Image (cartoon, rainbow, N blue to C red):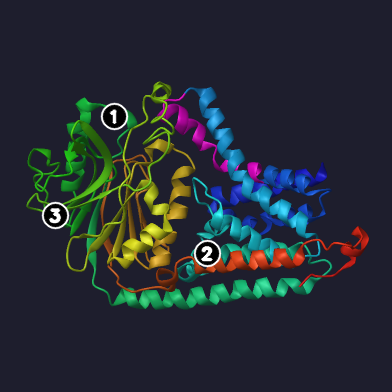
């Protein structure tokens, strides 16, 4: 009983570290119960349950906002919302459970590196709807997160988990703390050097101005066809207030709801802003007809000042129960459960939209900014600035707004690009290439502003090698597991007496 109470406390510590970035130290100790107690569980099945309990305690509070999103905005009845919420929380607890069971299988005398390597391997392999890594909880520590341009978030996750693993043995082997603390110091020194280097590059890079508009439309307003024109008019008015005239104006996701054909080369009667004084990147519903079939897309369009279509990007990853209903293709009747759910088609891949020779934008729509490989490919395709168009009104006034930004801002660090996030209700922000939020509009207000960014073309190790570090850690975990498994022919007391703590 006491063991499982510690699991719950550890899970809550991890949840708090994500919900409040100021509580970042809790992430460094939150995994201690999992790493300390599951190797001593009576059997692997007990360790699995212990880990699952910690995962539920961590993800339950962190995902609590889903209930309101599913009911109020998705249109589902409360019992259905609670079922989906509970199912997701249980599902996201499985990585904790797997790590716990494998630690029990390997035994308490396995290498101190087994727990962090298993943890990072679970982050790397397990398909979560929201790809949270424990390293994401450290967004307030600018020098510490710079390792993202080499390893992505996995390097920092490994050091955090390594420290927690060493802490579980510190009473008997205090010297085991030296290596993870030294690794953390290396990350800080590297971060200090990288911040100074990037700031020097930015100081000699020409500026570009981007106008960002947050119209604060409610979901009810966005859904009503008779308000489509009024909604766009609100964005026009806020855009006309921008001063000085920017090099590009950005509107959020699906501001234009009347539908634009994907074959259009000139906006004409579909034009959302005929009097635009600058190129406009805006979110819109688009469609493509193939005979009697019509496909709908969640798109971003680039309009030049002559009203020509200069490019389009279609959202790659659609959100279940918001933009499509799982299994509705096979069971159309279930659409009646959620009348607010859309029926969209995913896009084909990254696009780079050229505004000027220097300003080449990688447009992202909402969830797409969580896809590290997708963004990396766009940058390798020539993007000098990243821009997300989002409508996080789905999440209400919840922690999801900050959680989304905390995960997404790593794209700026990994690729060393300015990252503009234009949202309908917040958080609208600008993140610089070292991950600092340099501009933020207050949520739930009609606001517009002109941000100064500096388009960069520099490369990073992460752009070149991708998630190589993640694969190396997976190999490390496999190697330690193979060498740490219980040896046949030895009595339990003999196995426990072996010392393999390095």
Decide which of 373, 454 is in the foreground and name it.
Answer: 373
Q: Residue at x 32, y 61 (%)?
A: 378
Ranked by sequence position, the earlier of labels 1 and 3 is 1
Q: Which mark is residue 278?
A: 3
Residue 210, position as x, y percentages in the image: 23, 58
Horizontal side, residue 488 vs residue 417: left or right: right
Q: Which mark is residue 141?
A: 2
Horizontal side, residue 77 vs residue 497: left or right: left
Q: State which mark lies toward you, 2 or 1.
A: 1
Ranked by sequence position, the earlier of labels 2 and 3 is 2
Q: Residue at x 21, y 28 (%)?
A: 227
Residue 292, position as x, y percentages in the image: 20, 30
Horizontal side, residue 394 vs residue 232: left or right: right
Q: State which mark lies toward you, 1 or 3.
A: 1
Q: Secondary structure at mark 3?
A: loop
- Rendering quarter of residue 293: top left
- Rendering quarter of residue 125: bottom right
The vertical placement of 98 against 146, above or below, is: above
Q: Which residues are magenta?
A: 55-76
Tell me the quadrant of the picture where the N terminus can be found: top right
Residue 185, position as x, y percentages in the image: 60, 74
Residue pointed to by mark 1? 223
Q: Is residue 463 visible?
A: yes
């Amino acid at each position: 009983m006491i063991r499982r109470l510690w699991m719950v406390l550890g899970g809550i510590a991890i949840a708090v570290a994500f919900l409040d970035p100021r509580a970042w130290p809790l992430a460094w100790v939150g995994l201690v119960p999992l790493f300390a107690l599951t190797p001593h569980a009576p059997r692997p099945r007990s360790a699995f349950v212990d880990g699952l309990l910690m995962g539920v305690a961590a993800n339950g509070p962190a995902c609590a906002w889903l209930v309101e999103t599913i009911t109020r905005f998705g249109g589902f009845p409360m019992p259905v919302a609670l079922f989906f919420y509970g199912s997701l929380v249980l599902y996201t607890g499985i990585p904790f459970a797997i790590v716990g069971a494998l630690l029990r299988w390997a035994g308490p005398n396995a290498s101190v590196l087994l727990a962090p390597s298993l943890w990072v391997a679970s982050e790397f392999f397990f398909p979560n709807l929201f790809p949270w890594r424990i390293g994401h909880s450290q967004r307030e520590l600018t020098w510490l997160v710079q390792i993202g341009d080499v390893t992505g978030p996995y390097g920092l996750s490994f050091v955090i988990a390594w420290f927690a693993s060493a802490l579980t043995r510190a009473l008997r082997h205090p010297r085991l703390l030296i290596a993870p603390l030294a690794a953390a110091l290396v990350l800080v020194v590297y971060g200090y050097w990288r911040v100074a280097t990037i700031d020097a590059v930015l100081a000699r890079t020409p500026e570009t101005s981007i106008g960002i508009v947050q119209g604060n439309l409610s979901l009810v307003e966005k859904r009503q066809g008779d308000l489509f024109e009024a909604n766009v008019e609100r964005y026009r008015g806020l855009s006309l207030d921008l001063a000085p005239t920017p090099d590009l104006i950005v509107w959020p996701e699906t501001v234009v709801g009347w539908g634009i054909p994907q074959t259009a080369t000139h906006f004409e009667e579909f034009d959302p802003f005929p009097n635009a004084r600058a190129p406009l990147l805006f979110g819109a519903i688009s469609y493509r007809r193939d005979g009697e079939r019509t496909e709908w897309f969640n798109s971003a369009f680039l309009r030049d000042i002559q009203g020509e279509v200069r490019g389009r990007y279609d959202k790659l990853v659609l959100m279940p129960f918001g933009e499509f209903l799982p299994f509705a293709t096979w069971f159309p009747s279930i659409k009646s459960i959620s009348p607010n759910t859309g029926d969209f088609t995913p896009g084909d891949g990254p696009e780079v939209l050229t505004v000027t020779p220097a300003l080449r934008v990688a447009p992202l729509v909402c969830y797409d900014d969580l896809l590290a490989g997708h963004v990396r490919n766009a940058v390798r395709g020539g993007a000098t600035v990243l821009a997300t168009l989002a409508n996080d009104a789905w999440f209400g006034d919840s922690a999801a707004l900050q959680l989304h930004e905390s995960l997404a801002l790593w794209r700026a660090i990994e690729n060393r690009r300015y990252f503009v996030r234009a949202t309908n209700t917040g958080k609208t922000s600008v993140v610089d290439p070292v991950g600092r939020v340099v501009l933020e509009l207050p949520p739930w207000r009609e606001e517009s502003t002109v941000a100064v960014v500096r388009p960069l073309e520099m490369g990073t190790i992460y752009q070149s090698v991708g998630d190589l570090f993640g694969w190396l850690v997976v190999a490390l975990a496999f190697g330690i597991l193979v060498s740490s498994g219980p040896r046949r022919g030895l009595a339990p007391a003999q196995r426990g007496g072996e010392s393999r703590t390095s």
